[in-house]
């Protein structure tokens, strides 16, 4: 470190970074690496031929691993004063934890991508570049300590995603998805910015630390400024959009369905993690003084998305859409942690995010593998009898479904357990009760996915009592095997799913593995 | 016992499942051998456990139930003691986000919140006079199931693996002494059961499977909340934050919940429910669904009538006991006062199940459904005995749990045999089969008699003690419940006579020869085959042995029964003697 | 200047509402884009006003960032719109409704 | 008595029939018939021998200690001693012990002795039956259960034997299981018995929970000797059941009698007996004449210490008994099935015994049981011969003139009839006169009971001699009857032995208020049952005697007048008092009443549960919730229109809501 700063000070005058203190640069090293990666991939894309090369994914993977490595390093160092760029950014363990989840998920996506892109015939180099750019945005978001940085992070996260959503240029659905995502996203960010503006106006600061201090004073004096509260409301709305919590989720199902499966994977997990990171930091930390004000509305949003997501998912017959609604429901569960706001709430939320990363990545990865030329095979009819053709895949998918449903033996169980206990400890009984009621509902569709995979039912388009249709069909899906997609996952993709499955189970049996990480965690929030 | 026998008992089936995974699915013979061996070893181990447990002269005076949060309960003795405890730390948290917390209560007390209390789970295993018997029963039934499992069963390997996994789950539920661990096994056991249900059985299985899982889990989720609730309620009242069952049981001596508040309705004032009551109800709901008690039984007939025989042997035999087990182990010990408060309700539900199940069984035309409803009726007795909250009732309940496991398994095997031979489950289609299959008729007769509570067969002992226990609490309930015995005689005879007596009748067969031919060309024989005989023999033997000489079971269940009674009496609002039919001033209990 | 403070805020609020309504009612993606820009600029106005009012720089910096981001958003948007146009569909958002329940 | 000897003997007595049953059952009917033919009766006769030895060893003792209790094993004990981590808690406890005393030995003699004869008879009767081995398995099981019943010293094992008897009788009644009527009859018998068992069990509960010892402490015992020691009058009375008030004792008495009534086919649990005639005739002889149906009499006699404390219950017993006796007698007069007639006569005779024990004439009741066992078994077996030679025709209208073809059977049957109707020097005469004498002596409280009891004599002799005339005299009325032949010796010898007994056993106890009193029998039972309370005065007893004999002869005379001479038209009653005839012919419509009052409602309820409650309420609730969720889903998804405008609009709307709620602090 000392050498590094010495090197900087001795750097030639034209070297841009010489005026930047070294520890600031070290603090954001992962972001720098990813940023450099963006440029690197862009250049490499020009150099290497398009079709069927593995250079770009490899390069991307290396970049992500590098970022991950530095993040781990920072975790180990565990700087006493993690705030860098005078209060703009914090690489505290809270941020680093989120970084881990984001980077790991992205790695999985990168491994899945080549095969998928080849099958879908859209091997474009800029794909990886956009991916990395979005990751950079997420990393920024994880540690943002300033409203401006938050905004930058969100946009840097979103804009590449808009492009990725419409990445399959040729067919119409992705275009529609991208357009919806873009317009609604812009719409939402309008609210977000305006909310930030109001907060800034009422507190005179954009730094979260400063804002918190101001709010603490005003809260003590019991003077709750309506404009400030309005700002908080708009801020919440904007973030709720990003985490796709009902009733601000409307883009989610269509975008998930329209975007390529790999992008959906990335979107559904990494985006949610980053967005929730900032959500938690802002609400359970920065705006904590106003908890009495925002707690009930946030709780209501949580309940709405739990109910809406789970109930509508019951009516789905496409796994991607089903997972979209389940994602909305899961956002609701994590929202419990936000609404509780206390340390255990935050802990539980982080735990659930990690769990969510494993199970949801796995579930989407299965869909990715099943995809064929031109389309993603995620209709129930296409999944039926999967257990016959691909027992391993079907088994893993069942694991993910059970985990999302919150069964023991899987990481999902402890996720829910910690959230509920946090809610009860905080006296938020309604949240917990709605939580379990909706979990009960969620069983209906998660279990049905398993049922369909294991009993080769030809068509389950119709909703009414499909289980009765499942009736006569015997275990062998031979009837449907013909129509069924021949899964061409390839080794690496299968490995990813396997890892996700193993992780889901291992963490479900040894929750301590993650929880001990959360033990030492610290949140600089001001 | 120097070595961790309980952990081993849990691991053996697990390793067996792993082993089976590497066996090629085509080698059905090998699979069956491995399966039988593993289950047999498990049975052997559980018998070792049994012997070792009985070798303990009598539970040593209540051991100190450890400490939690550094606050020790040395002053309290857990009224219920456990043997062969093994405890391994599972998750230990110091609770709060270290640097988060000071920031939150920065100077102002408006948001001055303490961090979360530490969460401690542990792999804490142990047994008492209640669970050892159920473990042995479980091991036996899984062995029996392994024996009756036909090698022609489709996807034999998958079936075997799932079977062993569910054995792990069941035994885990019976041995766990940590609420979280308990819930963990409780739910995890459902997963293999779900796959077993949707994979094998008649055409209604898919519906039955989802119905069963959603129904049971919906109930259990409330229990999950209640588990967390117990943790916090006990914690806030006693400062002991723990999920450790013995500690919690001991701590209940501190927890005060008097029905002080009342609300009035129609001019009468009723005691308002306090947290303990709600927690009790949440647990009770989960267990009532599992047992199942009327009216929470709608999953049962479908599940039982659509399942395959080997599956039903352990599903009906042991899984339904877990609910009753939970009532005794958790409701009585963790909520003594609520147990007394809700005693009439639960006894009422028990009696309702007895009569309702019996009546429904009387009207069924599908023999599997007759047995299913008979099971409901029998388990009603168990719950009735449990909530008599006295020694006789509990002893009866414990022994009746074992009995019911044996009887119901045997009944399903018998019914399955008829189904396999004549491809029908309609009572009306069959008749007079004693001519064609005399041995089967004889065995079935014994089983049916055990089912209707024939003396010198096992069920009589349990039902007698249960009724005696219930009679002390309220003669009226006991008398009404005893109507169930009469009805049991009726529907059992209806089934037995319908199948084996009267003019010979079978679908597509008029005279004896054609019946025999029919069965022979379907499964190669008409009367009992050696394997079926081997499967039924131990069950029938147990029926007779327990019926003629039940003393051993009682001798070692009575300590636990007495302990549970003591545990629940901590919360008794009224002296128990007031409820018995004895002259005032004399109490049934306490007269040594 | 501070006397005008509420005026600027009301103006920005008005702009924001106009933009929002524009998003809600117009069907041409380009116009919708302009409306979104309007909303962002309303936010900018508010930021500048507050910056002036609170005598801090942060607001103005924020505004600059917003402008930059808005620009990049438009770039992506236009690219998408041309994509849609190339695929031979009318520039009508209601056309883009194949995915629904 | 030498305990070890008795232990061995009682083990043998109980063990042999059990062994016979087990061997037969476990070999799955594969044993050769000859072996079974020897083994089946053999074990029972051996048990009889052992019983005789027991009797002798008992008689060798002074009357004061002829009772001995032998414990076999601890059945279960749920009590917990203190110090084992719990405080002491008393639970249910019982052991398997037998009681050997005059009363039980008497019963054992009858069960094994007459039972043995019937076994021998069955070898001939069932010779050609497909289920020969099964039959003897059941018969042996029945003997075991019956012995267990009478020997048990604990309430629990009394109940166990009680229920096992019920099962054995079920198995034997439904022995020819391909006859639907037999199957139904068996089920009917079993269910009725179980009703009785429940009564017995509840009575046992009351005793167990409430009986107090000398010190006023609760005893919690099911040991019958202890119970009797503590319920009796005397020092501990106030600690006994009495302490709880007469109500409890009465309740116990009545609950116990519920069991007795079920076994002894007394009203209201009597309807199973006539149907039980579906079983093979030896079964009827064994179960419905000699042993099982008399268990009720034994029970009341055994528990007389309780009934002595419960006058109300005793009165109920007596009234039920006499009522049943009258009703069954009336019914018997109009039946045509030979076995049913005898069955009703059994019901009626047992009614008299119940009446006797009800009024406290215990030894008289037991004596009537003893003689009745002999002549009623005789009647059934003789009837069996007839039926056997007529190829299972049981209708007397199809018989006639058999006296010529089946001379031996005819005379045996006649002796049985004479004994039954109490014609002097035959066994029934002595027992019945003693019974009625006692009835009158204890009667004054209830003289009309005695009147009824005596008048039953007319009916008795009428219906039995009606059978004699219709079946044996006159001309054959069917070709079977013409081709009837005498039974084989194997079936004839037991009959004749019984005939001999029916003639002589009466002399064991001659008790006509003092003339030439021979009291072997009552003296033998005296240690258990105590002596008859009050001796009737000579005048009264003479009157009773005279009345009894005269009325019996009157009955015979009627038969003679109607069927031999035709002085009275046969259809006199059916013409003049049609209602009476119909009432009698239809067995007072009890079956119909129960069908309407109990069976149909239960079945209706069951079908309602299955057809209405189960699918609509129980299942409907669950599927209903599932459907609600489905509907909600369909409603909610309509929001997801796919139109961006709608999305933006809803988004905007909720944003504004949030703005308002938070900004105006509505939450």
Image (spheres, rainbow, N blue to C red):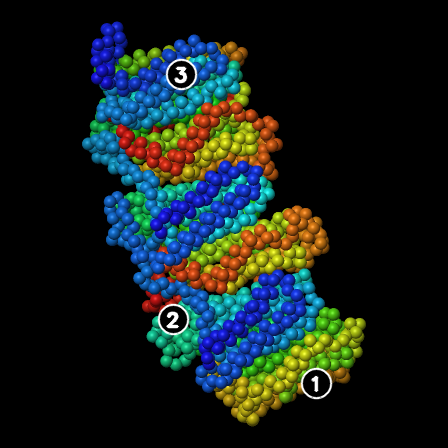
Q: Quadrant of residue B236?
A: top left
Residue A375 in view here: yes
- Left or right side of B74 for D629: right
Q: Nearer the viewer, mark 1 or mark 2?
A: 2
Task: Say few, some or many: other residues with alpha carbon within 10 Å of mark 3 (under 14 / 14 to 19 / 20 or more).
Answer: some
Which disc is residue A59 wearing? 3
Q: Is residue D363 above or below residue A66?
A: below
Q: Residue at left 49%, top 26%?
A: A367
User: Quadrant of the image for the C terminus of chain D?
Assistant: top left
Q: Which residue is mark 1?
A: D557
Residue D611 horizontal/vertical position (percent): 58, 50
Task: Say few, some or many: other residues with alpha carbon within 10 Å of mark 1 (under 14 / 14 to 19 / 20 or more).
Answer: some
Residue A152 in view here: no
- Left or right side of A384 for B564: left
Residue B473 horizontal/vertical position (percent): 40, 61
Residue D189 horizontal/vertical position (percent): 59, 66
Q: Which residue is mark 2?
A: D219
Which residue reaches farthest left?
A: B107
**Subunit ID for the residue under disc 2:** D
- Left or right side of D614 for D121: right
Does dot 2 land on a helix, a strand or a loop? loop
Both marks 3 and 2 on one chain? no
Residue B467 horizontal/vertical position (percent): 45, 62
Does dot 3 land on a helix, a strand or a loop? helix
């Amino acid at each position: 470190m000392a050498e590094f700063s010495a090197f900087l000070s001795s750097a030639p005058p034209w070297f841009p970074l010489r005026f930047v203190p070294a520890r600031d640069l070290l603090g954001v090293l992962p972001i720098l690496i990813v940023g450099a990666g963006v440029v690197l991939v862009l250049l490499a894309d020009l150099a290497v031929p398009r079709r069927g090369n593995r250079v770009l994914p490899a390069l991307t993977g290396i970049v992500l691993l590098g970022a991950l490595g530095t993040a781990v390093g920072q975790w180990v160092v565990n700087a006493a004063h993690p705030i860098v760029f005078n209060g703009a950014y914090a690489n505290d363990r809270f941020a680093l934890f989120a970084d881990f989840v984001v980077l790991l998920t992205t790695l999985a996506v990168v491994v899945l991508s080549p095969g998928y892109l080849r099958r879908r015939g859209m091997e474009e180099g800029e794909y990886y570049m956009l991916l990395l750019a979005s990751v950079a945005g997420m990393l920024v978001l994880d540690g943002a300590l300033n409203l401006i940085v938050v905004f930058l992070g969100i946009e840097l996260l979103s804009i590449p995603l808009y492009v990725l959503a419409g990445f399959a240029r040729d067919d119409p659905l992705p275009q529609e998805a991208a357009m919806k995502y873009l317009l609604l996203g812009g719409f939402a960010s309008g609210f977000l910015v305006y909310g930030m503006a109001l907060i800034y106006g009422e507190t005179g600061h954009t730094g979260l630390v400063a804002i918190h201090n101001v709010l603490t004073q005003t809260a003590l004096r019991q003077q709750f400024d309506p404009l400030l509260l309005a700002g908080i409301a708009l801020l919440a709305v904007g973030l709720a959009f990003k985490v796709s919590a009902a009733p601000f989720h409307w883009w989610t199902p269509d975008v998930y369905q329209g975007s390529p499966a790999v992008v959906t994977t990335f979107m559904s997990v990494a985006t949610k993690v980053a967005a929730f990171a900032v959500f938690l930091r802002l609400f359970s930390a920065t705006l904590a003084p106003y908890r009495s004000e925002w707690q009930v509305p946030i709780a209501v949003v949580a309940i709405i998305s739990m109910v809406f997501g789970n109930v509508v998912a019951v009516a789905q017959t496409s796994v991607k859409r089903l997972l979209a609604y389940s994602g909305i429901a899961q956002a609701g569960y994590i929202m419990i942690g936000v609404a509780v706001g206390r340390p255990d709430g935050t802990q539980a939320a982080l735990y659930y995010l990690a769990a969510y990363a494993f199970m949801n990545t796995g579930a989407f990865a299965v869909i990715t593998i099943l995809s064929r030329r031109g389309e993603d095979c995620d209709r129930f009819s296409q999944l039926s009898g999967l257990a016959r053709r691909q027992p391993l895949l079907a088994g893993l998918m069942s694991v993910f479904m059970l985990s999302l449903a919150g069964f023991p033996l899987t990481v999902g169980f402890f996720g829910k357990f910690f959230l509920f206990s946090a809610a009860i400890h905080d006296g938020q009984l309604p949240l917990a009760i709605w939580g379990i009621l909706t979990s009960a509902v969620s069983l209906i569709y998660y279990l049905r996915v398993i049922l369909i995979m294991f009993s080769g039912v030809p068509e389950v388009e119709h909703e009414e009592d499909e289980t009765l249709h499942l009736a006569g069909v015997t275990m062998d899906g031979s009837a449907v095997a013909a129509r069924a997609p021949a899964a061409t996952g390839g080794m690496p993709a299968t490995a990813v799913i396997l890892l996700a499955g193993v992780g889901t189970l291992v963490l479900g049996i040894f929750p301590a593995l993650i929880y001990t990480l959360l033990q030492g965690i610290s949140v600089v929030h001001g | 016992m120097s070595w961790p026998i309980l952990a081993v008992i849990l691991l053996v089936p697990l390793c067996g499942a792993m082993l089976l995974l590497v066996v090629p699915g085509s080698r059905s013979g090998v699979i069956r051998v491995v399966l039988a061996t593993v289950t047999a070893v498990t049975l052997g181990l559980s018998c070792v456990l049994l012997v070792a447990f009985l070798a303990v002269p009598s539970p040593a005076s209540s051991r100190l139930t450890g400490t939690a949060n550094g606050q020790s309960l040395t002053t309290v003795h857990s009224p219920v003691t456990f043997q062969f405890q093994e405890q391994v730390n599972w998750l230990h948290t110091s609770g709060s986000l270290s640097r988060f917390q000071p920031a939150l209560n920065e100077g102002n007390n408006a948001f001055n919140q303490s961090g979360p209390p530490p969460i401690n789970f542990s792999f804490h295993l142990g047994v008492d006079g209640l669970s050892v018997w159920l473990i042995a029963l479980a091991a036996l039934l899984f062995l029996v199931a392994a024996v009756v499992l036909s090698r022609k069963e489709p996807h034999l390997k998958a079936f075997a693996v799932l079977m062993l996994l569910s054995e792990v789950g069941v035994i885990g539920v019976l041995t766990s002494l940590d609420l979280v661990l308990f819930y963990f096994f409780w739910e995890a056991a459902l997963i293999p059961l779900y796959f077993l249900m949707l994979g094998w059985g008649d055409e209604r299985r898919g519906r039955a499977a989802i119905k069963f899982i959603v129904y049971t889990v919906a109930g259990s989720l409330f229990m999950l909340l209640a588990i967390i609730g117990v943790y916090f309620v006990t914690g806030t009242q006693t400062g002991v934050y723990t999920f450790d069952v013995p500690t919690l049981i001991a701590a209940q001596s501190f927890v005060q919940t008097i029905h002080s508040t009342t609300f009035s309705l129609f001019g009468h004032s009723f005691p308002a429910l306090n947290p303990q009551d709600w927690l009790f109800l949440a647990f009770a709901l989960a267990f009532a669904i599992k047992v199942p008690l009327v009216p929470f039984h709608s999953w049962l007939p479908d599940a039982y009538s659509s399942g395959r025989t080997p599956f039903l042997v352990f599903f009906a035999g042991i899984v339904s006991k877990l609910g009753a087990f939970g009532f005794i182990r958790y409701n009585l010990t963790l909520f003594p006062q609520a147990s007394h408060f809700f005693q009439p309700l639960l006894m009422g539900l028990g009696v309702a199940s007895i009569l309702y199940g019996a009546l429904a069984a009387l009207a069924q035309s599908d023999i599997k459904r007759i047995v299913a409803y008979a099971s409901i009726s029998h388990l009603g007795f168990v719950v009735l005995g449990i909530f008599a909250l006295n020694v006789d009732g509990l002893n009866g309940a414990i022994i009746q749990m074992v009995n019911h496991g044996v009887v119901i398994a045997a009944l399903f095997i018998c019914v399955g045999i008829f189904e396999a031979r004549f491809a029908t489950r309609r009572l009306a289609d069959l008749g007079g089969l004693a001519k064609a299959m005399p041995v089967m008729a004889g065995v079935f007769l014994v089983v049916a008699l055990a089912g209707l509570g024939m003396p010198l067969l096992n069920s009589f002992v349990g039902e007698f003690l249960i009724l005696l226990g219930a009679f002390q609490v309220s003669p009226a309930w006991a008398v009404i419940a005893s109507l169930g015995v009469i009805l049991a005689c009726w529907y059992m005879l209806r089934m037995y006579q319908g199948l084996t007596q009267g003019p010979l009748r079978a679908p597509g067969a008029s005279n004896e020869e054609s019946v025999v031919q029919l069965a022979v060309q379907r499964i190669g024989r008409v009367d009992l085959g050696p394997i079926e005989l081997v499967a039924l023999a131990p069950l029938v033997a147990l029926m007779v042995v327990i019926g003629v000489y039940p003393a051993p079971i009682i001798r070692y269940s009575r300590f636990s029964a007495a302990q549970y009674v003591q545990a629940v009496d901590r919360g008794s609002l009224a002296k128990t003697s007031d409820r018995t039919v004895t002259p005032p001033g004399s109490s049934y209990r306490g007269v040594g | 200047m501070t006397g005008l403070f509420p005026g600027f805020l009301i103006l920005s609020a008005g702009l924001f509402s106009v933009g929002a309504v524009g998003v809600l009612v117009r069907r041409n993606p380009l116009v919708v884009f302009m409306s979104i820009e309007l909303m962002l600029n309303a936010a900018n106005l508010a930021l500048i006003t507050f910056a002036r009012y609170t005598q801090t720089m942060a607001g103005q910096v924020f505004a600059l960032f917003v402008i930059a981001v808005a620009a990049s958003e438009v770039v992506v948007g236009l690219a998408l719109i041309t994509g849609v146009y190339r695929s031979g569909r009318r520039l009508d958002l209601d056309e883009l409704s194949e995915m629904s329940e | 008595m030498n305990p070890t000897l008795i232990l061995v003997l009682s083990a043998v007595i109980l063990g042999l029939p059990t062994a016979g049953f087990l061997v037969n059952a476990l070999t799955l009917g594969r044993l050769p018939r000859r072996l079974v033919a020897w083994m089946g009766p053999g074990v029972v006769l051996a048990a009889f021998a052992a019983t005789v030895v027991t009797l002798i060893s008992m008689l060798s003792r002074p009357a004061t200690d002829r009772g001995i209790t032998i414990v076999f094993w601890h059945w279960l004990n749920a009590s917990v001693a203190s110090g084992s981590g719990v405080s002491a808690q008393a639970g249910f406890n019982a052991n398997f012990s037998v009681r050997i005393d005059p009363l039980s030995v008497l019963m054992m003699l009858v069960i094994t002795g007459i039972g043995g004869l019937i076994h021998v008879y069955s070898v001939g009767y069932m010779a050609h039956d497909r289920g020969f081995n099964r039959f003897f398995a059941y018969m042996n099981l029945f003997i075991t259960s019956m012995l267990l019943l009478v020997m048990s010293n604990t309430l629990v094992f009394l109940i166990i034997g009680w229920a096992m008897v019920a099962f054995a009788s079920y198995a034997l009644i439904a022995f020819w299981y391909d006859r639907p009527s037999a199957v139904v009859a068996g089920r009917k018998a079993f269910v009725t018995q179980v009703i009785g068992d429940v009564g017995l069990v509840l009575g046992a509960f009351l005793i167990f929970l409430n009986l107090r010892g000398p010190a006023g402490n609760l005893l919690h015992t099911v040991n019958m000797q202890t119970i009797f020691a503590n319920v009796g009058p005397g020092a501990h009375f106030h600690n006994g059941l009495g302490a709880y008030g007469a109500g409890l004792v009465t309740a116990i008495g009545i609950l116990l009698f519920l069991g007795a009534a079920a076994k002894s086919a007394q009203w209201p649990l009597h309807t199973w007996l006539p149907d039980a005639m579906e079983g093979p005739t030896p079964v009827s002889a064994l179960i419905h004449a000699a042993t099982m149906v008399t268990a009720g009499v034994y029970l009341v006699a055994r528990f007389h210490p309780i009934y002595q404390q419960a006058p109300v219950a005793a009165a109920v017993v007596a009234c039920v008994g006499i009522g049943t006796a009258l009703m069954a007698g009336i019914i018997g007069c109009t039946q045509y099935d030979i076995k049913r007639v005898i069955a009703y006569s059994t019901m009626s005779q047992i009614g008299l015994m119940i009446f006797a024990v009800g009024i406290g004439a215990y030894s008289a009741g037991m004596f009537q049981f003893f003689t009745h066992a002999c002549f009623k078994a005789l009647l059934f077996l003789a009837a069996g011969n007839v039926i056997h030679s007529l190829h299972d025709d049981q209708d007397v209208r199809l018989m006639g003139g058999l006296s010529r073809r089946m001379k031996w059977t005819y005379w045996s049957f006649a002796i049985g009839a004479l004994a039954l109707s109490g014609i002097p020097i035959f066994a029934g005469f002595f027992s019945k006169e003693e019974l009625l004498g006692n009835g009158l002596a204890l009667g004054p409280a209830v003289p009309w009971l005695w009147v009824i009891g005596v008048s039953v004599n007319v009916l008795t002799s009428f219906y039995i001699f009606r059978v004699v005339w219709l079946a044996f005299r006159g001309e054959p009325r069917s070709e079977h009857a013409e081709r009837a032949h005498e039974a084989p010796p194997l079936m004839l010898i037991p009959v004749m032995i019984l005939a001999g007994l029916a003639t002589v056993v009466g002399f064991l106890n001659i008790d006509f208020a003092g003339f030439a009193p021979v009291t072997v029998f009552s003296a033998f039972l005296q240690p258990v049952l105590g002596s008859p309370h009050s001796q009737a005065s000579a005048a009264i007893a003479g009157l009773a005697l005279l009345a009894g004999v005269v009325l019996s002869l009157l009955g015979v005379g009627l038969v003679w007048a109607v069927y031999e001479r035709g002085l009275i038209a046969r259809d006199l009653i059916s013409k003049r008092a049609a209602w009476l005839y119909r009432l009698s012919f239809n067995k007072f419509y009890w079956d119909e009443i129960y069908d309407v009052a109990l069976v149909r409602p239960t079945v209706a309820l069951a079908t309602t549960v299955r057809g209405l409650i189960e699918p609509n309420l129980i299942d409907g609730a669950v599927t209903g919730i599932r459907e609600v969720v489905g509907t909600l889903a369909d409603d909610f998804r309509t929001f997801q229109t796919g139109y961006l405008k709608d999305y933006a609009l809803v988004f905007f709307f909720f944003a504004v809501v949030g703005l308002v709620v938070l900004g105006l602090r509505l939450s």
